[in-house]
Image (cartoon, rainbow, N blue to C red):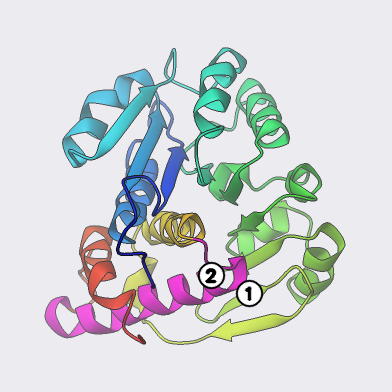
Amino acid sequence: MHRDPHSHKGENGAVAVIGGSLTMHGAPLFSALAAEASGVDLVYICVPRIHQEVARTQSLNFQVHPFRGDDLRSEDLEPILELLATIDCAVIGPGLDRSHEGLEALRELIDSCHCAMVLDASALQPWTLDAGKGKTVVATPHLGELERMGIEPETIGDASKQHGVTIHVKGHIDRIAGADGTIREIRGGNAGLTVGGTGDALAGLIGGLLAQHLDPVDACVTASTVIKRAGTLLLHEYGYAYTTREVIRQIPHLVNIDE
């Protein structure tokens, strides 16, 4: 991607990841590591207090903002929203608690957020597209999450156009519906990409690309292509036993491959 040679720290993207719960620490960290690997300048991560130390050990670049407790609650929203006011893109949902209280706080967060958003995992609910309407939003469901959202696979173009958002349905063939209803399909990869965390990495990579001013559909197409190419390369070395950390390590080598 083009970068102004005279740019300064922070001008090439700032991403925040909001995720995690008492029993789920890896998901938001995969998203944050993938955003970092995309080339953004700054990465902030908001995770449960119990996971703040492990988050700090994953990268010296991470600026960690712990929740007040071990799950997202309404009392966490004010400091998070203050942070998001300075951010180019927020990745919201990986690993978040889906209790009633947690989902209420999550919906309020999405309603009140004004930066670009990638909504993944727990942030994919029947109300998600209504909460994101009129905003720069990319939703990244797999087929099960798409069903939870109440959307039939064959109607993703209509749903995207109605709400003015981008829907990136993950699968053997990724299907990306832009806000105008146009659908792109990305093929490739292999069954090794079923390993836990690759969807979180995809969400973080899309967030990093949005923060660097890619159009939402272009960000999704690039991220999908990169993750699938990484799987293809890793298959030769690891068979199907590669992990999401290996996938993320491939991102800097692949993200500008067509330039």
Seen in the picture, residue 130 relative to 53 is either above or below; the reply is below
Query: Mark 1 or mark 2: which comes first in sequence?
Result: 1
Residue 217 belongs to the span the image colors magenta? yes
Judge by depth and name the residue closer to the eye, 204 or 239.
204
Q: Which mark is residue 176?
A: 1
What is the quadrant of the N terminus in the image? bottom left
Disc 2 secondary structure class: helix
Residue at the spot 12% in from the left edge and 80% down from the top edge: 237
- Left or right of 205: which side holds 84? right
Seen in the picture, residue 78 relative to 231 is either above or below; the reply is above
Q: Quadrant of residue 228?
A: bottom left
Q: What residue is pinned by disc 2?
A: 220
Residue 34 seen by the camera: yes
Type of residue at label 1?
Ile
Q: Quadrant of residue 74?
A: top right
Q: Which residues are magenta?
A: 213-238
Contact? badges 1 and 2 (CB < 8 Å): yes
- Left or right of 114: which side holds 247? left
Seen in the picture, residue 202 relative to 73 is either above or below; the reply is below
